[in-house]
Every structure is written in C-alpha cells, then in structure tokens.
Image (cartoon, grey):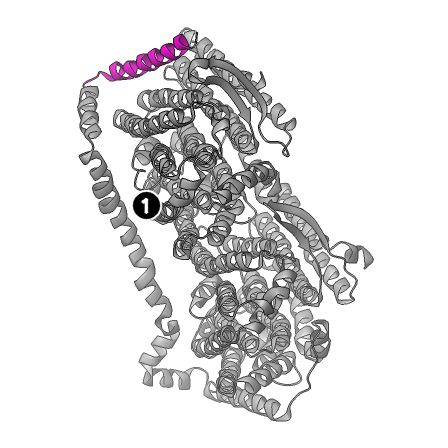
Amino acid sequence: MSAFGSNPWLAVAVPFIVAVVIAALGRRATAVTQWVAVLGPITASLVGLAGLQGSVASSSVPWLTQGSASIDAGVAVDGLSAIMLVVVGVVATMVVVFSVGYLEHDGAKARYFSLLALFTAAMSLLVMSTNLVTLFIGWELVGACSYLLIGFWYHKPSAASAAMKAFLTTRVGDVGMLLGLALLWKTTGSLDIATITGAAPGLTAATATAAALLLFMGAAGKSAQFPLHIWLPDAMEGPTPVSALIHAATMVAAGVFLIARMWPLFEVSEAARAVVLWVGTFTALFAATIACVQSDIKKVLAYSTISQLGFMFAALGAGAWGAAMFHLVTHAAFKALLFLGSGSVIHGTGTQDIREMGGLARQMPVTTLTWVVGATALAGIPPLAGFFSKDAVLAGVLHAVPAAGAVLLGASLLTAFYAFRVTRVAFFGQSRAETAAHESPLSMTAPLVVLAALAAVLGFFGGSITHALGLEAEGLEAAVAGASVLAAVIGIVVGIVLYAGDLERAEVLKGRFQRVHRLAFGGWGVDALVQRTIVAPAGAIAGWVYRVLDRTVIDGGVEGIGAGAQFAGKIASRLQSGETDVYASLVAVGFIVVMGIVLWAGR
Amino acid sequence: MLLTAIIFLPLVGAIVTALMPKDRGSVARWIAAGVTAADLALVVFLALRFDVAQGMQFAEKIAWVPQFGISYHLGVDGISITMLFLSALLSLIAVVASWKMETKPTAYFAMLLLLEVGMNGVFVALDFVLFYVFWELVLVPMYFLIGTWGGPRREYASIKFFLYTLFGSVFMLVGIIALYLQTGTFDISAMADLGLPATFQWWVFAAFFLGFAVKVPVFPLHTWLPDAHVEAPTAASVLLAGIMLKMGTYGFIRIALPILPNAANQWAPFITALAAISIVYGAALAFAQTDLKKLVAYSSVSHMGFVMLGIASGTAEGLNGAVAVMFSHGVVTGMLFLIVGMVYERTHTRMIQDVSGLSNQVPVAGGLLAFASFASLGLPGLSGFVGEFLTLLGAWKSSVPAAWVVIAAIGVLLAAAYTLSMVQRVILGAPSEAVSKISDLTVREVAVLVPLVVLTLTVGLYWNSLLRFTDPVVTRIVAMLAGA
C-alpha cells in the first residue's frame, strides 16, 4: 500500500499509460489489452484506499509562472478525494470487466478500452487536484472522454448528435466556471484550492456569492441539473457500461464533488446555498416525474440519475455536504448496478423498451436478483444502502428548509414508484418478447453481483465516510426514517398494484391523462423549448450575420466607400482581361526601387 | 551573425531556386526543404543557447544610415524567439506539404523561401526601417502565391489582400515617421518607455493601430481574410494564418505597448470591445460556413480576438496568454489548413455537405482532424486552452468593463459549437460519395502533421514549456504600462 501512498500521481499516470498502450497496440491485441485496462482503475482505488488510511503524500511541480504569481500543478489525497478515487476505481473496474462481455463482438474495442482508461486518468486528476486549473483540465478531459464515448458508435447520426449536445450543454456551465476561476484569481490572487478556501471568509458577500454561483453553473452542467439536464437522457446513445460509469456513477457526480471541495466558499454565501438547494430540490422532483413515464429502460435510469443528483445538490444547499457525499457513494454503487443490469437485459433481449420485455426473472435469474437489490436500494428500503444515505439527505434538508424536505419526500415516493414499475414490467409477469432472452456471461454477471453486494452493505459505512471527510456522523432520526420508508413503501405498492395486470391498467390511465402523459414523456417540453428558442435561431442568426451583416454591409461598405476600392475595381477588371503579371511586376519593381533608394542612402 | 544567417539563408535559397530552369521542380523542392530545415536547425540552436532570464540577446547592430539614425539592428527576446521558431517550423512544413506542386514549381518554392525571409525578419528587426522593409517584403511573395497558385478568384483575393494591408502599412509608416521626428532615431529598442507626450502617443498609437489591426485582423477590418484564405494554396494559408496574422499582434506587443504605454492604456477599453466583438462575431461567421476552409479562416478571426483581448488587458496573464494563443493558433490552425488541404486534394471539394464520414473511410485523417479540432476549440490539456484561459484571467483582472469579458467567454462556447458541428458533419457519420473512394494520408503527410501534434500536446500539458520564454518579457512590458 505504501507505494501507492507515496505517489498519488500513480492514479493519473498508470491509467494514462494504459490508455496509450491499448491505443498503440490496436485492434489485434484487444484480447489481452481489454484485461490490461483494469490496471488503471485498480491503481486509482489503491491510491484512494491508501488515502483513507491517511498515508498519501502530496506532490506538485511548478507549472506556470505569471508575473509574480505562480501556479503549481499539484495532487494530494485527502478524505474527500480518497472517497472519490475509490468510487471511481471500483466502479470503473466493474465496468471494464462487464464491457469485456458486453462488447465481445465490437470491432472498435481498442478505442473503447483506451478511452475508458483515459477517462479514469482524467477523473483521478480532477479529484486529486490541489488547484482549480488542473481540476478544470481534468474536468474538461472527462467531458471530452464522455463526448467520444457517447459518440462511440459515431456512424449513427443520433449518437453523433447526442455527443455534441452533451459537450455543448455542459460547456454552457463551463463558461460560468471559467469566469468563476477568473473572479477568484482576481480577488484572491490564487487558484490554489487551499488558499481560496482559506481566503473565503474574508471575501465580500457579493464576491463570494458571485464566485460560488459561477462555480455552481459548471457543477450544474456537469451534473445535469435543471435546466442544463437536457443532455443526459440523450447521452444514453453511448454503450450502456459507459452510461453506468460516466453518466451515472462518476463524472456526473463531479459537480457534487466540486461544491464539496469548495465548501468553505459556499459556506460564506447563504444566497448561493439557497440557489443550490432549490435547483437541486426542483430537479429531484422534476426528473422523477419524467422517469415515471419513460418506456426506455435507460431513459428511466437517466432521469433517475438526474433526480438523485438533485437530492445531493439539495443536501449541499442545506449545508449537509457530508450527507451529499454519502449519497454520492451509495448512488454510485446502486446506479452503476442498475445501469449494468439494464445492459445485461439489453444484451439478453435485444431491446431497451420495457414494454417488449416481461418475465425476465425466469430467463435471467442473476440479472433479475441483482436488479431487485439495486431497485430496492434506489427506492430507499432498509437495510439497503440507499435508505441510509437518502435518510441523511432528507434529515439535513428537512432541518434546514422543511418545505424543500417535503418536496424531496414526494420525489422519494415517485422514485420508489418508477423503480418498481420497471422491475414489475420488465422482470415479472408474462413475457411480451418475440424471442426468448438469455442470461449474460460470467464477465457480465460477476460485476453485477459485486455491485449488488456493495449496494446492500454500503449504508452501514455512512459513519466511516462522514468521518473520513472530517465531519461528525449523525445517527438516524426515527421520524425522518419513518416518513422516508413510508413514502418508499407507498411508491412501491402503487407501482406493483398499477402494473399487477401487466400494462392494461396503466394504458387505461395513460388514455385518460393523455396530454399530461405526453408532456411528461417529453420531459415537460424543456428540451423542445431549448431547441426552438436557442438551437434553431442560432443557425439563422449566424447565417444572417454572415450574408447580410458581414458580406453586404461591412465588406460591401469597405469596398464601396474607399477610393482604393474603385482603384481595386479598375485593376481587377483589367486583370481579368489577362494582364495579371503587369500589376504584380509593378509591385515588385516598386519594391526594388524603394530598396535601392534605402541602400543608396546608406552608402 | 546567427540572426543574419537565419534571415538571409532562405534568401539564398530563394535566389537559387528562382534562377533554376523551370522544369527542375524536383530539385527546387529539395533545395527549399534543405534550406528551411537548416534554418529551423539554426533557430533551435539559437533557442538552446537562449537565456530566458536575459532580455534582448544575439543582438547585431551596424550603423546603416547614420545621418538618419537608421541601423541594421537585430535581436531576440523570449517573445520574438517564440515567433521565430514558429516561422521557421511552419516554413519547413509548408515546403514539405507542397511536395507535389506541379505549377511553376521553381518560382513557387522561391516565393515560399522569400516569404520566410520577410517573416523571420519582422520578428527579429529592432530598427523601424528594417522592420518596415521586412513587413512590406512579406506582401510580395504572398501576393504572388495567392495570385498565381490560388483558386478561381485568386486575382480578386490577392489584390484585396494587398490593398488592405498596404492601406494599413501607410498609416504605420506615418506613425514611424512621427516617432522619428519626435525622437530622432529609428531604433525600436531605444524608444521603449521614453515617456513621450500623451497626446502625441495617442495619435501615433492610432496610426499603428490601423496598421496592425488590419493584419490581425480585428473586426471590422477582417473581410480580406476569408477571400485570401479560400483562394490561397494550402501552404500559403498555413503561413498566412500561422505567421502573418501574428505580425499584427506582435507589432502591438513589440512596438505599440512599450513605446506608447500611455496611449495603450487609453486605447485598452476600445480594443477590448473590438476584441470581444471579433471573438463572438468571428465565431458566428464560422458557424454559418458551408465551406470547410472558410470555416477555419473565420475561426481565425475569433481566435485572434483572444490575442487582442489579452493585449488590451495590459496584465501579465493577458500578455502571456496573448502570446500563447498566437503560438497555439499558428500550430493548430496550421494543422487544420493542412488536413483540409489534404482532404481537398483527394475529394476535390471543400463543401461540408459533400465531405462526411472521414473517420470511417480514412481514420488517420479523421482522427488527426478531430485532434486538431479539439485543440482549436480550447480543450484543456491541449495548447489552445492555455492562452484562452490566461487571456480571460487577465482581462477579468484588468480594469476593462467585465461585460466584454463575459462576451469573450461566451466565445469559448461558440467555438465548441461551430467546431463540433463541423466534426459531426465531416468526421462522423457514414462516408459520403466523395469520401467513399479516397485513400488515407501518406507517410509524408503524416510526417508533416506530427511535429504540430507534439507541440500541441507539449504546450497544453506543460504550460511553462512556452511561458518560461514569454513571462520575463511580459513582466517588463507590464511594468512599463503600469508606470505610464
């Protein structure tokens, strides 16, 4: 362990080298290199584990000098980054193993596994950085890996569009984050995280609020919070293991990590925390309602992820950042499990539409069993992990802002409902498929079992996680726990009862509330609104700027008003009659004459 | 003598190739490659012996026209050596990229070499007359490169390019003469920070501004650029975007700021506004393009806006960032023009709608174009981000209105938009008819691009590899501005 403790750069360097090696060896070597890919995430988790034992040195190199100020590229492992490293390492290891089976027949495996390793390197850099510049580099590089993996099957136009949408939407947030960095540089004279958090109490309220909100813009983009959430459902175009790793467990949680990392800054600004709280709370409920009506199993999970991230942001806004991190950890386990489970289902059935599934329990027993564990954890039923962490979140929010806590309880009810709606419709009842499904190979089911075990027991480690963050652990509160379990049970019962006779009752209900259903199914029209008011006009505006403003007004104006333009016109028309070289020679002769005069004068 | 050799070695090559029989193109290209490679070797030798802690080095000064205070004065500091290296590297790359030139090859390579003389000269001249001679010298070969080896509208484009720049140079000449009358010398290094009268500074700055801003180009003086680029042969585009645009911003940094610091401060808000507009406006124009080469050309307007933003900030971050953008843009846009040219040679079209699915058909070309695109949109870890980030830090820190900085930052988003929509249409998807028959890049073509890829990664991953050269110079300039 000490080797990993003494050099945290290993968590960046090893996966990076692995990525280069896999890419360099190419297609023919993938039978071996796909297994080599696990070395990266295993190293990251070992560095993280060493960090949890408090034995990691920090390391930095001078990297940039700026007049009198300078920036060192440094990494260090404290409790927060250790937790993130372990989460990233463990989930990525499971995802790599799962992918070996899932992508068995894909021709571009070298690219795939290389990108997974590169992602791990960038994520390690992000979570270990001691300054905001290298953090931002990691932040953008995970975004680039996300882009390349969403667009992994780039011959599909939908995948290519989804990749671009993901990158651009998150970049809206990143523009804010960049300005936040610039503001912090101006006011604190540093981008070193410790220096900034140390200086935070001395900032004026306006500055602290502005800086915190600009950073939150970046976090909201990365973590798909309303209204920047629109990219995440589309991102499901990528291979499902990628969705599990990047778009559920790790990268999308980076926004939560960022605020936890910069917590002293948010602590100073009550206004910023209120914004974080209400954006998170609203997103949690909003996305849960959409998840209730989706029929694509991955879309349900995507909206569920948005909603769960909303829970974490609500906790951050309420000041319970330990609870947010606890929920980040358990969510990583059970949501990665659910995504990989859905991958197994898609692999076994060839469809993503839950209406074309049904009765999978008999054909895919391991997948079903582990899925139920994940769904129960998501619903928040004790003693599974989701119960404990969500309880911590709810307790924190209820104490700070009861109204927001009440909204989150409602969202919890919906969460339990949609989790068991999918469970009931896809895994139980009669099969609606035309062909029989088959259980997935061991390389896919083994990671499911490991993650299911984690989703079952991680809840008992809440105390250790809070402790590692340097916070006091709080016990369960009977009232909060009771309310939360009650909400979950109601949701589950409604889900099972509504779909007891398969899809019939739900179809009747859907028929009765057709308009509401259609709106909810389309994400309450946010995406369509963005397309109509921003994306579509952008092209038209750019076209107008080019054709009218630039070519006609400016270029035409410059050519029209200048006397030189007439001169040019005359020459141009003469030139077009074939006297090109006359003018050119004149220029050359003129130049030589000028040179001659200068040289003569200098005799 | 080293600097003299670096400037005039290509001139020897130019004369030799120009005098060769017209059918000896295959010999001329070897001579051109040898000369540009030797020149690059000299620059690298220079850079290795360069001491970043010192100011002007390798100075050569010989009285030329003493009665007018004109001297043959050369020297390099951390900023000029950066640009000199870029000039020598891109010249070599331009020659190798033109290996298959069949039209009047001897004259063509002579022109490329003559161009290098002018570009190298501009970046090391420390006397105004010398500077002006090199500045104007650059125009002649570029005029011929566009006008003779260009596309269908080459005459229009070359004349427009020529007149625009000439228009700017006239004002620059007025500025030079005014400075001479005021100080009695043409020596650039002797004029720095003299504390010239404020009103005088303001007017001279105005003259230099016009001269440099056309070259950069700054909105609304940019309309010559797309015409020149679209018609120019690939190698000329590389040098035009890679080096010649930087002559304008180099002029601001080498001349306008140190000699006219007081005016620079006064002009800063105005330049900031134009810079922010250039960034967003150039991006909008790039977004509207249907021609791949025009898209890259307009993106230059946007990127050069960041350089101007950094210059106007008058801060260490901003000026370091400005040079970083200059360097990175030279490397990255060079790559983009080269790959677009290589694809054009195969498909005979640059229309985005006709070129798609490169990744599928020609993965090496597609992959390298994707890499260059990500560098161009400023992905951290690659060189483009360094300067954009630092110029934004600097601009925000300076006293210019924050609203312009916010507008400039939006340019970062727009860059991603126009670049990725190009990537989506051209690189991803299924191969179009024009693409479905083409072959991937040759070894020579890949070899042309590899040095640029390496530089993009080196600067992007280790910022100090570039900034350690620029920072000491920048620190001195910032001190002059602060004292004015």
Residue at 55% from the left image edge and 29% from the top image edge: B81
Residue at label 1?
A: B285
In the figure, is residue B200 to the left or right of A91?
left
The furthest residue to the right: A2
Under circle 1, the secondary element is: helix
Give x and y (percent) for residue B414: 39, 52
Residue at 18% from the left image edge and 35% from the top image edge: A560
Quadrant where the N terminus of chain A lies? bottom right
The subunit carrying tag 1 is B
Give x and y (percent) for residue B256: 43, 35
Residue A140 sits above or below residue A410 on the image = above
Give x and y (percent) for residue A585: 29, 13
Quarter occupied by residue B199 = top left
The prevailing secondary structure element of the residues shown in magenta is helix
Can residue A324 be seen here?
yes
Q: Amino acid at mark 1?
A: Leu
The span shown in magenta is A577-601
